Amino acid sequence: MSFVHSFSVWFIPFLIGFIILYGTYKKVPTYETFVEGGKEGFSIAINIIPFLVGMLVAISVFRASGALDYIMLVMKPLFSLFHIPAEVVPLGLMRTISGTGALGMTSDLIATHGPDSFIGRLASTIQGSTDTTFYVLTVYFGAVGIKKMGYAVKVGLLADLIGFLASIFAVSLLFHS
C-alpha cells in the first residue's frame, strides 16, 4: 500500500517534469507553448458556454416536467419482464444527458438503498460504464462546429445501452443472490 500511495502522489509531478525536460531537450519553447495552450483552452471554454447553458436548461425542463416519471410508469412492466430494477432506469437515461444529474441520482440511490446493496452497486457500475453522449455531442461537437452528428449519436447511444445492459449482467452475476 505504501508503494501505491507514493507512486500516485509523485506520478503527476514526475510526468510534468519529464515533459518539460524532454521539451527543453528537443528545443521546444516549453513555457511559451504552455501559455499558448492555455490561451486556446480559455477560448474553447468561452465557446462552450452557450452550448452548456442550453444543455443545462433542457435537462432542467426534462426533469421538472415530469416526463421522466411518466416514461418510468409506462415502461415499468417491460423492465420487470427483463429483471431490470426500475430504480436504475432513470439513471441510465439521465447518464446519456448529464453527468452531474446522473451523479445526483446515483448518490440518491446509494443513500436510499446503501452502497453495498444490489441497487447501490448497480448504480455505481452504470455510472462508470456509460457516458454523457448528448452532453459530449452538444458541447464539444458544437464548440468545434460539427453539424452532422447522426452516426455519432447512434454509436454513442448504442455504447451507452451496451454499458447499461452489461452493468446489469455483471452486477447480477457477481452480487445478486
Image (cartoon, rainbow, N blue to C red):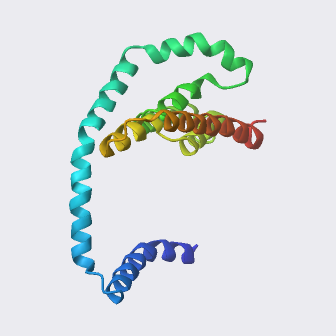
Question: Hey, which quadrant is residue 84 in on the image?
Answer: top right
Q: Is residue 50 left or right of residue 67?
A: left
Q: Is residue 70 left or right of residue 173?
A: left
Q: Residue at x 52, y 28 (%)?
A: 93
Residue 158 rendering spot, x and y as whole percentages: 60, 35
Numbered marks: total: 0
Residue 117 appears in the rendering:
no
Q: Residue furthest front?
A: 148
Q: Is residue 14 left or right of residue 47?
A: right
Residue 115 rendering spot, x and y as whole percentages: 58, 41
Residue 40 rendering spot, x and y as whole percentages: 24, 59
Residue 16 rendering spot, x and y as whole percentages: 37, 76
> Is residue 102 or residue 39 the one in the foreground?
39
Q: Residue at x 58, y 29 (%)?
A: 88
**In the picture shown, does residue 40 fall above or below 161?**
below
Q: Is residue 149 left or right of residue 77?
A: left
